[in-house]
Image (cartoon, rainbow, N blue to C red):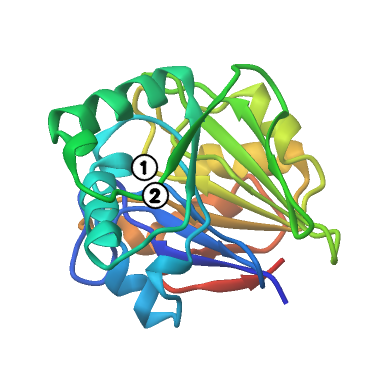
Amino acid sequence: MPKLIILGTSNSIPDEKHDNTHMVLVGKRSKILIDCASNPILRLQKVGINVLELTDIILTHFHPDHVTGLPLLLMDMWLMGRDLPLNIYGLHYTMDRVETLMGLYGWENWPGFFPIAFHRISSGELVSVLENDEFDIHASLVNHMIPCIGLRLEGKSSGKVIVYSSDTEPCAQIIKLAENVDVLFHEATGSVPGHSSAMQAGDIANQAGPKNLYLIHYPTRENSIDKLVPEAKLRFNGPVFLAEDFLSLDL
């Protein structure tokens, strides 16, 4: 059965038990990495996925804790002998900077480098990102410090839907994106510009009505980590969980 595996749950400052937030969508024919903060090779191996099997990468936005692992990942796949094409998706803002970043490494001169297709997602609500016979993925622009997308992931065989807020302040776009979904992964960095607190995540869930709320992209190095779920429950009466690294959910 297709599944979503969480490879990291921390905000921008990880610890020994929590990597920066990123995840992988796993089907029989497609393996879709969502964000690439650190080189995910070892984490993918730990969950039984060969990095060379990745078919697609979706980047939610161009902040270091979400994209800086990409050049090393691409280089390592090249050194490991990858020859299959790879698709990378993101907003125009994100893709322009990714191409500039790779250009600084001179990747056009790496001999025998495998084909990469950059797919630029238009800004808006419920914009199609990619669709195949296993998954249907849409994105909505959310409220962060730079252009950023939240993602709606639908498993075609099950009809289940999981939404990932990415980095965002509370916004109407996430409420619409997550309306009555099976699972909402919402960030809980704190009530600071461009982000949301656990209580605010609970408020979003209360308005959107997901069956389950998972808090993610939270401050793992603070002593207040045990307070996150209770804070979210002050606003949302449904099930609330703290996402942990290597959590796996069927889709």
Whether 178 is drawn above or below 239: the answer is above
| Mark count | 2
Whether 17 is drawn above or below 202: the answer is below
- Location of the C terminus (image quadrant): bottom right
Mark with earlier residue (1, 2):
1
Q: Residue 22, located in which quarter of the rendered image?
A: bottom left
In terms of secondary structure, where does tag 2 sit?
Answer: loop
Residue underneath mark 1: 189
Left-right relation of 152 to 86: right
Whether 228 is drawn above or below 163: the answer is below
The residue lying furthest to the left in this view is 105
| Residue 96: mark | none
Whether 138 is drawn above or below 49: the answer is above
Q: Identity of the amino acid at label 2?
A: His
Residue underneath mark 2: 217
- Location of the N terminus (image quadrant): bottom right
Q: Residue 133, located in which quarter of the rendered image?
A: bottom right
Q: Nearer the viewer, residue 102 or 128?
A: 102
Left-right relation of 154 to 143: right
Q: Nearer the viewer, residue 198 or 110?
A: 110
In percent of width and height, residue 80 lies at 26, 68
In percent of width and height, residue 59 lies at 44, 39
Q: Identity of the amino acid at label 1?
A: Thr
